[in-house]
Amino acid sequence: MALKTIGVVGAGTMGNGIAQAFAGADFNVVLVDVAQPMLDRARTTIAKSLAKFVEKGALTAAAREGALGRITTATSIESLAALEYVIEAIVEQAAAKEALLSRLDAVLAPSAILASNTSSISITQLGAATKRPDRVLGMHFMNPVPIMKLVELIRGHATSDASMRTAFELCAAIGKTAVEAADYPGFLANRVLMPMLNEAFFAVMEGTGTPEAIDTVMKLGMNHPIGPLALADLIGLDVCLAVINVMHEGFGDPKYRPCPLLRRMVTAGQLGRKSGRGFYTYA
């Protein structure tokens, strides 16, 4: 591929995972975040993740060092000006993403493609915040990015065939399987997943079963590798709430109403693994 360097904006869990996936596939990566401590933490996280692959024999020590060496960090989006493909992986809030994409639109060359790692927000809406809606698309990676093979590619109303083709080629280049989804709330993955998680939240709230019981039923009875409540804790309960809200508002259907228990837990700061407590407690 002609593309050799990828920009990633947002050095949180998804951003550093995306950076690792590209760097591990011989791409240079410019990882941007507003705060240097976030970038330092991301580099440490990536180094630890790559070290685990080395321990398992899936990666050589030299390859680990090579991947780390291909990642540079910056605190200004102006450092991305020369790049032709940039992925945003910031907070799952439409206004924040629109503001960032508008700024990137002004910085990057007209030919550059802007991809959003959003898990639910309309790509058409995000594209409208730029002057290049034909070059805006959704590139929804699964968590944890270095391990999960799926990438959901979302075509906005104006996204061009050429932009989608480039995204498919990039996914193949980093060993991911891409599936195209239409631009409807929740796309494909969360359209199916979030109602299941939300129903599990209601089951806990109503006393139908404990989190352990619900997760055991889904693992042993439905052959899921992880229970819905443990998965929600991994994703982040705040992220789950944001996605369910988007679906509820986007479809206007009461079947997507977020569980009151989920709202209460998020308000209380019980967000899952990231906060140390969700439906389970983490050390």
Image (cartoon, rainbow, N blue to C red):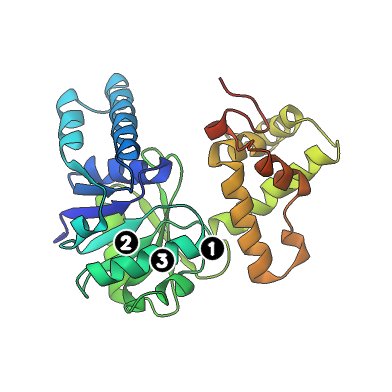
Point 32% across, 77% down: residue: 132
Q: In the image, which disc is placed on residue 34?
A: none
- Rendering coords of residue 57 (x, y %): 27, 22
- Rendering coords of residue 212 (x, y %): 72, 27
Q: Are marks 1 and 3 in contact (CB under 8 Å)?
A: no
Query: What separation in Å lies between label 3 and label 2 (alpha carbons)?
Result: 26 Å
In the picture, measured across the screen, residue 51 lies left or right of residue 1, that is right
Which amino acid type is shown beneath numbered disc 1?
Answer: Phe
Q: Earlier in the sequence, mark 2 or mark 1?
A: 2
* Quadrant location, the N terminus: bottom left
Q: Is residue 42 visible?
A: yes
Q: Is residue 164 visible?
A: no
Per the image, the residue denoted by label 2 is: 168
Point 44% across, 70% down: residue: 126
In the picture, measured across the screen, residue 66 lies left or right of residue 173, that is left
Which amino acid type is shown beneath numbered disc 3?
Answer: Ala
Point 62% across, 29% down: residue: 277
Which amino acid type is shown beneath numbered disc 2?
Answer: Phe
Query: What separation in Å lies between label 2 and label 1 (alpha carbons)?
Result: 17 Å
**Tag nearer the camera, 3 or 2:** 3
Point 45% across, 79% down: residue: 157
Per the image, the residue denoted by label 1 is: 187
- Rendering coords of residue 235 (x, y %): 54, 42
Q: In the image, which disc is placed on residue 99?
A: 3
Query: What separation in Å lies between label 1 and label 3 (alpha carbons)?
Result: 22 Å
Q: Nearer the viewer, residue 7 or 178?
A: 7
